[in-house]
Image (spheres, grey):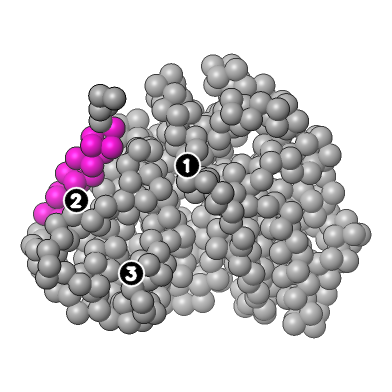
Amino acid sequence: MNLLAGLDIGTQGVKAALYAADGRCVVEAFEPSQPHRPAPGVVEEDPEFQLESACRLLRRCVEQAGDTGVAALAVAGQMAGVIGIGEDGRAVTPYDSWLDTRCGLQITRMQAEAGAEILHATGNAPSFNHGPRILWWREERPDVFARIAKFVQPGGYVAMRLCGLDASQAFIDTSYLHFSGFADNQHSRWSAALCARFGLSMDKLPRIVRPAERAGSLTREMAESCGLRAGTPVMGGCGDTAAAFLACGATAPGICVDVAGTASVFAATTDAFAADLDSGTLGCGQSATPGLWHPYAYINGGGMNLEWFRREFGGADFEELNALAAAVKPSDNLPFFVPHLGGRVSPAWPSLRGSWAGLTWDHGRGELFRAVLESVALEYALYQRALRRLLPGTLFSELRITGGGERSSVWNQLKSDVLQTPIVQIENGGGTPMGAAMVAGIGVGILSDFPSAAAQWAQLGRRFEPAAATAGYYQSRVARYESLLHGLNDWANLDLPS
């Protein structure tokens, strides 16, 4: 069998899967991550542990499949964080996670000095992403920064190590460029002007590749660790959300995607680059499908909030919490929840934090958990509005959902009612590993192109239709939620006398 291997270096953990050429998942495996939080706002991971997890999981998959005929491999991973590597290609920093909020001052400075220029060039405003993080390492850890030859992302780092690449061969694929802070995204190159503006040597930035471009081949040492053949092709891969979009079949204009994972990502698919210069809410990243773009916005840790609530306040499993939330009927007296516990990303309001508002003694776990679920839908409504302003006349026919949160029927219906848009589940949703396996297949020619592969691999499932009678109610809720956000952000940025 010509199996295709997909890896996801994700936030919750590393996933590996082997797929047949017809899109059938042969075997998959998962290993949880080990995030390190040594201080408030600091979130790091060990890049070598991520690599070791990937090797263990690939070996497990191969052993369970009973077949070593893996034709190619691609790695996807977390997108907005960075790893500094030395000349030998080994990490000299921890993985500075996309959940890490230390670079708030650098975000503010980049916004003030060149915010519009960065947004116009990259498609994304400065936020908790590569540019501010790189500046943070330069300014706060200059001794470490001096040892850094290149900055890469977890997926690229694992692929480099699997192939034995050094810093001269370090790479980033095009699906990450909107997060870079220093790219001319439309032309898939680094911006000399932006690098000069912030005094960053372009030597610190890796080469740019296409997702299905071959990055290297599996070394003999790594092949033994993974249970694969030495020389197995390793593709450039893509970001985890870009891979998830592929797994949803978002390979044609008009298809929207909701990645209901650790982050809550709302994205469209278009055939044109569009920078949101009006509101700075939306980023615009390259699709893995050549010629397509994904205008998107996301909540930093939006899905993580559900686990936080269950752990700290719920005392129950998600099935029980979903049942409690489903029993709560729409009412003007329901509380609001602000989901930005780690700062707002879209647009970049780094000082904003989470909150409940409108609580009374009548509210219990059901109302509180419903508010947590609803907050994502309310935030998505603001993203939807920004999309319609940015791309007037564009039809967004449906929102396809992937990620662990897609299993919640009450959450899906809430999103459908708030957005007044059908929500469609993916029948065989393999998420990011599935998308990565598709990239591997394209890279070696087993699959002909992304649209035809996605049409075969991504099968649509249950459909949630919006209740038209709720449209006015949720329009009012969205307006009140937006007002709450602005009020809390003003409060968070008050310059109080000392």
Q: Which residue is mark 3?
A: 313
Q: Position of residue 202 (x, y in %)?
A: 67, 24
C-beta proximity under 8 Å, tags 1 and 2: no
Real-space Cα separation, disc 1 to disc 2, in angstroms: 24 Å
Q: Earlier in the sequence, mark 1 or mark 2?
A: 1
Image point (25%, 79%), residue name: 324
Real-space Cα separation, disc 3 to disc 1, in angstroms: 24 Å
Instruction: Please state which amino acid type lies under the numbered disc 3.
Output: Phe
Tell me the number on the disc at residue 374.
none
Q: Earlier in the sequence, mark 3 or mark 2?
A: 3
Q: In the rendered image, which quarter is residue 418 located in?
A: bottom left
Q: Which residue is mark 2?
A: 481
C-beta proximity under 8 Å, tags 3 and 1: no
**SS of the residue at dot 1?**
loop
Q: In the rendered image, which quarter is residue 20 located in?
A: bottom right
In this rendering, the label closer to the viewer, 3 or 2:
3
